[in-house]
Structure formats: structure tokens, C-alpha cells
Amino acid sequence: MNNRIVDVLREEAEKHLVCVREDYSGRAMYGRKCFGIVGRHWSLAEVVGWARTRLDGHGIEIPQPKTDYMGLDDIWYWPELEGDPSRAIDDE
């Protein structure tokens, strides 16, 4: 079920031109990596809203995201949702 949530969030992020992070390590995650989306607050809310609408009919709920602020943008991330490491972009 978590894979389905990640797939739908990723698809909606791509539709709305929001960046996807497959390998975010947020606060108190001690190096563990998870799925997240990066953008302006209103864009992230729109992505999650559309994803919730798509999953609602299937009885799947998207957990409440954690948030971090990255200068001009925010990241909403889900420690319980694993991203796809093969899709991660190397920042180096």
C-alpha cells in the first residue's frame, strides 16, 4: 500500500512540476531515507490534495507529512514512505 501512495504522490508531483526527493533524510531520522516533495507550500498542498482525491476511493489514506524549510521552498516528507533509490539524483 505504501508503494501505491508513493507512486500517486510522484505522479501528481510530476504533473504539477513539483520536485521529488526519493532519498530525503529528515530530522531525527539518523541517516534513514524516505520519500518527499519539494516546492512552495501551496504547490505541495495541491499535490497532496490531488493524490488524496485519487486514493480516497480505494480506502487508502496518505499519512500526515513532516515538514522542513529549505530557504525559499519547503519539503514535505514521510518517514514511513520509502522512495525509490534508483530514481534519486546525486547532488554531488
Image (cartoon, rainbow, N blue to C red):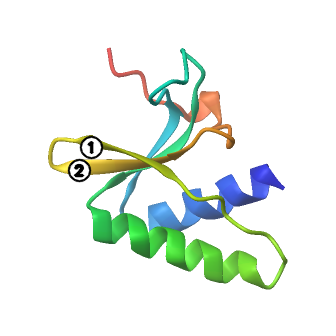
Q: Residue 73 placed where, x, y %?
A: 23, 50
Q: As drawn, is 37 to the left or to the right of 5?
A: left
Identify the residue under disc 1. Answer: 69
Q: What residue appears at the point 42 percent right and 75 percent down from the top-left corner? A: 46
- Looking at the rendered structure, the kind of residue marked 1 is Tyr
Extreme residue in the front direction: 28
The structure residue drawn at horizontal position 33% and vertical position 68%, both measured from the top left corner, is 43
- Give x and y (percent) for residue 81: 67, 43
From the viewer's perspective, is residue 32 above or below residue 14?
Answer: above
Mark 2: amino acid: Asp
Locate the C terminus and report the quarter of the image it occupies.
top left
How many other residues sit within 10 Å of disc 2, few (<14), some (14-19) or many (≥20)?
few
Percent from the top left, x then y, of residue 91?
34, 22
Q: Position of residue 71 (x, y in %)?
A: 16, 42
Does dot 1 land on a helix, a strand or a loop?
strand
Residue 37 against residue 85 in the figure, above or below: below
